[in-house]
Amino acid sequence: MYKLITAVILSLLCGGFYPACGAADFIVAQLSAPADIETIYQLCRNYKSWQEQADESARQISELKEILKSTDNDSEKADILEALENEKRQMSGLKKNIRQGIKAAYGETRNLFPQFKPDINRPSLYDPADYDPDSARMLAEARRLIAEIRSVNSSIYHADGSNTANPIEKRVWQDTTSAIENTGKTLVLGLTNFFIRQEGKGRQKPDYLKNAEPILTIGPFLKRGKGGDVPEGDQTYIDFYALKKSQDNQYASALY
């Protein structure tokens, strides 16, 4: 029952992408205590995506400009101009987070694809209709989390697929863009690192994570193409880590 509740809470955390019945494919270590669940639920209810925050800033900027036109008081004008500049800086930062988050998630996952539907005889990477919809939602969520990690860990590999002529890469860029626009810098799990691996093939964990356990694992996905360190295969997982001290991150399942 606790695992089911955890899956539901993580579904809320991730924007409602996961049905609770998907817990078998959405592997997650238990949180530090059942009492954390209500705390996370409250955080999720207050969640706003980057795009929602950017839209809110745009509305604030528009309203401040209208107010500025209607006042002749120099002191009020100074206050409004200061508020306007603050909103513009916030808007700029949000747009940068969105742009860089898309590039980071695309750079790290452009060779990953959802699992195919089990009833397709000859599935094709060129046809999204052949993808299992639950697996596609899981991959979108993994990309969102990578974008969030990028905001605290800029060492993630970035790539720009906005001008690619390859039809598969173009669709992956579009899918990544759609996912990242719904991302917010919440990081309530304290995620700081991730590692992509092929189950049973190649490295399963880098040396710097040897004493850490993932607090979240999403997959499996398909890995196609020779690029990167991850071998090709159909059992590709993304492990997410929170490399913070326990007092900084009460949601981590292990101490680092």
Image: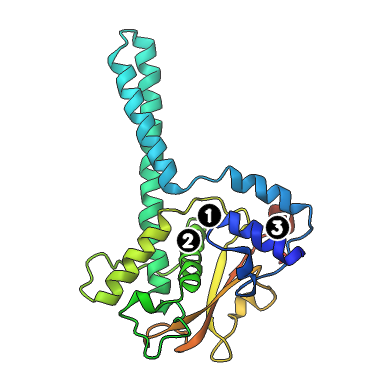
Determine the CA span between mark 3 and mark 2: 19 Å
Q: What kind of element bears circle 1?
A: loop
Residue bearing mark 3: 251
Q: Look at label 1 and name its amino acid.
A: Gly
Give yes or no for contact between labels 1 and 3 (Cβ–Cβ under 8 Å). no
Residue drawn at (40%, 32%), measured in percent from left and top? Answer: 86
Residue bearing mark 2: 144
Determine the CA span between mark 1 and mark 3: 18 Å
Q: Look at label 3 and name its amino acid.
A: Tyr
- Compared with residue 70, is residue 192 higher up or lower down, i.e. above or below? below
Q: Quadrant of the C terminus?
A: bottom right
Disc on the earlier residue, 1 or 2: 1
Residue bearing mark 1: 15
Q: Position of residue 148 (x, y in %)?
A: 50, 57
Disc on the earlier residue, 3 or 2: 2
Q: Look at label 2 and name its amino acid.
A: Arg
Q: Count residues near mark 2 (Cα–Cα under 10 Å), then give few for <14, some for 14-19, many for 20+.
A: many
Q: What kind of element bears circle 2?
A: helix
Q: Is 114 situated left or right of 187 in this image?
A: left
Disc on the earlier residue, 1 or 3: 1
Q: Closest to the observer: 180 or 77? A: 180
Residue drawn at (79%, 58%), measured in percent from left and top? Answer: 33
Q: Position of residue 150 (x, y in %)?
A: 47, 60
Give yes or no for contact between labels 1 and 2 (Cβ–Cβ under 8 Å). yes
